[in-house]
Image (cartoon, rainbow, N blue to C red):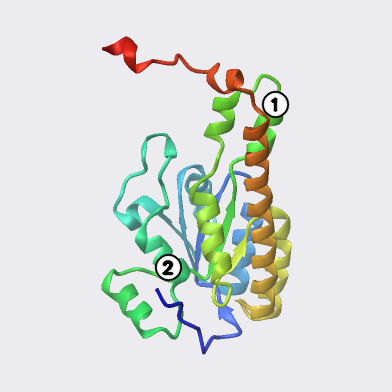
Amino acid sequence: MAIERVAEIDDRVPIRRALVSVSDKRGLDRLMHQLVTNCGALEVYSTGGTYTALKDIARDLSGLTVTAVSDYTGQPEMRGGLVKTLDFRIYLGLLSETYNVDHQSDLTRLSAVPFDLTVVNLYPFTRTVATQGSDCEAARGNIDIGGPAMLRASAKNYLRVAVLANPDDYEALIEEVSTHAGATTLAFRRKMAAATFEATALYDRAIADYLVSRSDTEVSSPYATVHPEARA
């Protein structure tokens, strides 16, 4: 597979559509209000509890439209929320390039939309494993899959997509769009991409360190282990 080089980009990218899925909902209301104030009408695609929170915000915020990812993709969430955003149309919207004719054709063919902003923070793995009484099953259940995938795809495409992995960066985005008439600059997107890769690296490091430090007994103790020979 040959990796294609991008030759043309836009420095400033207006924010019109966002993909939002957060476990930490601090500052979400202010962020949405400021984005609509500075960017105009905003389409947000979301999942689960974030979708519910955004719908509540949208009731009092003209200009904010909220769509469930499952309605957009046509696929229901897997029981337990294990699969929500791992869908071709989602990643086409994150990774497509503005001046790639084939990418734009794919967007049109599939009635997909390009995302200009991704706001995702991850399942609270480190907080979970630090909780007294937490076991390996609680830890395993808080290993985020879709979140890191969305973050990494968005960060890779910093040429077009702004990405936030931490609520502490919301104010920086608000300042950016207020300064640049509702758009993000390449310099800002690159900075946020670097912060995002740092966040996902630390997240993976914490998971690996936890699993390495567990004994076989700790790993197996939450479960009633069924041995195949016992079923024969």
Q: Position of residue 232 (x, y in %)?
A: 26, 12
Observer able to see residue 57: no
Q: Label 1, on which residue?
A: 131
Residue nearest the viewer, comparing 204 with 129? 204
Res 72 quadrant in image? bottom left
Left or right: 131 as drawn, with respect to 153: right
Observer able to see residue 177: yes
**Seen from this angle, which residue lies furthest front?**
229
Residue nearest the viewer, comparing 68 with 232? 232
Res 76 quadrant in image? top left
Left or right: 33 as drawn, with respect to 82: right
Vertical position of residue 150 compared to residue 96: above or below = above
**CA distance for labels 1 and 2:** 37 Å
Q: Position of residue 15 (x, y in %)?
A: 55, 73
Left or right: 151 as drawn, with respect to 84: right
Categorize mark 2 by other alpha carbons within 10 Å: few (<14), some (14-19), many (20+): many
Q: Label 2, on which residue?
A: 93
